[in-house]
């Protein structure tokens, strides 16, 4: 960057002062003590428009909205578009440590904070040499791609290595994970945001209520948990702490087969009525008499268990449910097995089959569905990738930025670790989405992972490598960087 020596500018002002002092008082020039920056802007045309804040108290100039990842390759040689002061003289230290005037017509390197000094005309004229102010220019650049999913290790559920099938649910500020251990139904509990510390207890009266098996369905509604037994006794049990359960009177008189999903004012479920399975909820339209209700019959292609649901707000500002699970007969498109989500729209359930194979979500073992960042995602055991949809009908693989952790196995002694996570090949998991901190929690039971990976050899031929590794009962949290940035900006 070309710079002019300050001594020349200062000499000009001092000579001017000497000349004017010899003139009559009517010809005296008043020099300003103003040494503040009034406007600042960088030429970020290639990146978009970014506003810079001038903090006059801390003497800092910075952009609240960070520039994109890899903007370092642009701001290493960038033009200052606007730099407005009363005197028009701003300096920085040159290589020799001298104050030299900045020429904004030349590019400047702002990869690191830059200290500049603003000189008032009084300081330049020697009238008041201390009338200067130093400012620090800081250009904030994202260190993580805002469109990428970032994964963090959050500890172990159980040091004894919880194994086998599990179900997890959020109850207010806690995550509760259920699993059968040594023939007893156990519940593991940790606070959201502090999943390094877990406590465990045996579910009270587990034998009489749940037959020491995992509940066939479990959900959270208005600060209580509700669950159905694998014994299919038609009862619904409720709990305020996840350990002690009582028969619920919210479903009195109904033979409930399966709980589906909660909304803000009701729980949707399946019950048996006159030998038929029908959809019902805990809060129907009050003007319709119970005897006059015409409940929708459950079709044969509706999921029969292993329910995974997500709730969302529709374009018309209504609450909606999207649900998948285990089917009696796996749906197909042509000869390809696929997942068909079901949506709850108002008072009815409707299927959302894909239009063709290319827009279908392939069948997965133990699939989960989540609504995240205004999109639907499905993933399942083996953890190869996310599948994404805007409306739940047309599905495709999510891009590589929104990913499940995987590693390069080319090193012969490589082993997955919390620092280098690998999810591929894993089974026995559950998931919880916390909307308050935009986090996806995936909880694993300990096990041994097995997966095949197709690679390209040195001679450009394709080969399949077989990988195995063991893992503990781990908890992982994923969060989209952009949502993390938004929370940080809001001070959350």
Image (cartoon, grey):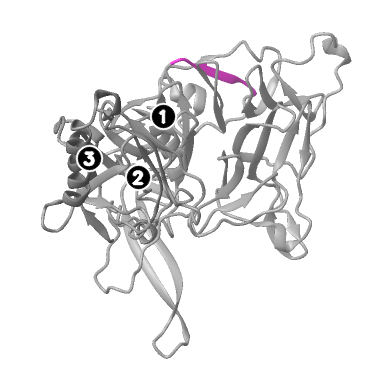
Q: Nearer the viewer, residue 100 or 29?
A: 29
Which residue has dot 1 on it?
A: 175
Which tag is nearer the camera, tag 1 or tag 3? 3
Q: What SS does tag 2 mark?
A: loop
Q: Percent x, y for residue 38?
A: 37, 33
Q: What SS does tag 1 mark?
A: strand
Q: Which mark is residue 140?
A: 2
State the residue at coordinates (35%, 57%). 72
The stretch in magenta equals 234-240
Q: Is residue 161 visible?
A: no
The picture quadrant where one finds residue 26 is top left
Which tag is nearer the camera, tag 1 or tag 2? 2
Residue 459 in the figure: left or right of residue 273: left
Q: Is residue 216 visible?
A: yes
Q: Earlier along the polypeptide chain: callout 1 or callout 3?
A: 3
Q: Is residue 236 magenta?
A: yes
């Amino acid at each position: 960057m070309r710079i002019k020596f300050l001594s020349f500018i200062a000499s000009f002002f001092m000579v001017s002062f000497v000349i004017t002092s010899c003139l009559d008082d009517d010809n005296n020039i008043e020099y300003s003590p103003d040494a503040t920056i009034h406007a600042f802007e960088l030429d970020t045309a290639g990146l978009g428009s970014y506003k810079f804040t001038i903090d006059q108290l801390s003497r800092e100039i910075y952009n609240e909205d960070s520039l994109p990842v890899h903007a370092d390759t642009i701001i290493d040689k960038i033009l200052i578009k606007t730099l407005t002061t009363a005197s028009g003289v701003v300096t920085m230290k040159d290589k020799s440590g001298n104050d030299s005037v900045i020429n904004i017509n030349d590019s400047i390197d702002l990869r690191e904070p830059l200290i500049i000094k603003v000189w008032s005309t009084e300081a330049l004229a020697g009238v008041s040499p201390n009338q200067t102010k130093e400012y620090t220019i800081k250009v904030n650049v994202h260190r993580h791609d805002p469109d990428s999913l970032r994964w963090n290790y959050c500890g172990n559920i159980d040091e004894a290595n919880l194994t086998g099938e599990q179900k997890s649910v959020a109850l207010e500020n806690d995550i509760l994970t259920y699993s059968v251990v040594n023939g007893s139904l156990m519940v593991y509990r940790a606070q959201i945001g502090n999943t390094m510390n877990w406590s465990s207890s045996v579910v009270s009266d587990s034998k009489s209520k749940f037959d020491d098996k995992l509940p066939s369905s479990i959900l959270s509604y208005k600060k209580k948990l509700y669950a159905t037994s694998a014994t299919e006794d038609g009862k619904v049990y409720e709990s305020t702490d996840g350990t002690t359960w009582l028969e619920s009177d919210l479903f009195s008189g109904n033979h409930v087969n399966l709980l589906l999903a909660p909304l803000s004012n009701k729980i949707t479920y399946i019950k048996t009525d006159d030998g038929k399975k029908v959809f019902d909820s805990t809060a129907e339209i009050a003007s319709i008499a119970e005897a006059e209700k015409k409940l929708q019959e459950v079709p044969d292609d509706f999921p029969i268990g292993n329910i995974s649901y997500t709730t969302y707000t529709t374009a018309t500002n209504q609450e909606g449910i999207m649900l998948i699970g285990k089917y009696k007969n796996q749906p197909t498109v042509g000869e390809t097995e696929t997942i068909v989500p079901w949506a709850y729209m108002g008072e009815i359930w409707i299927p959302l089959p894909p239009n063709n194979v290319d827009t279908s979500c392939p069948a997965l073992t133990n699939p989960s569905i989540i609504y995240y960042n205004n999109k639907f995602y499905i993933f399942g055991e083996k953890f190869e990738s996310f599948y994404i949809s805007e409306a739940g009908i047309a599905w495709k693989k999510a891009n590589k930025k929104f990913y499940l952790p995987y590693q390069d196995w080319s090193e012969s002694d490589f082993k997955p670790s919390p620092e280098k996570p690998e999810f591929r090949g894993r089974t026995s998991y559950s998931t919880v989405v916390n909307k308050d901190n935009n986090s996806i929690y995936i909880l694993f039971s300990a096990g041994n992972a097995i997966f095949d990976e197709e690679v390209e050899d040195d001679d450009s031929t394709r080969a399949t490598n077989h990988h195995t590794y063991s893992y503990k009962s781990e908890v992982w949290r994923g969060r989209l960087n952009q949502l993390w940035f938004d929370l940080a900006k809001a001070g959350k």
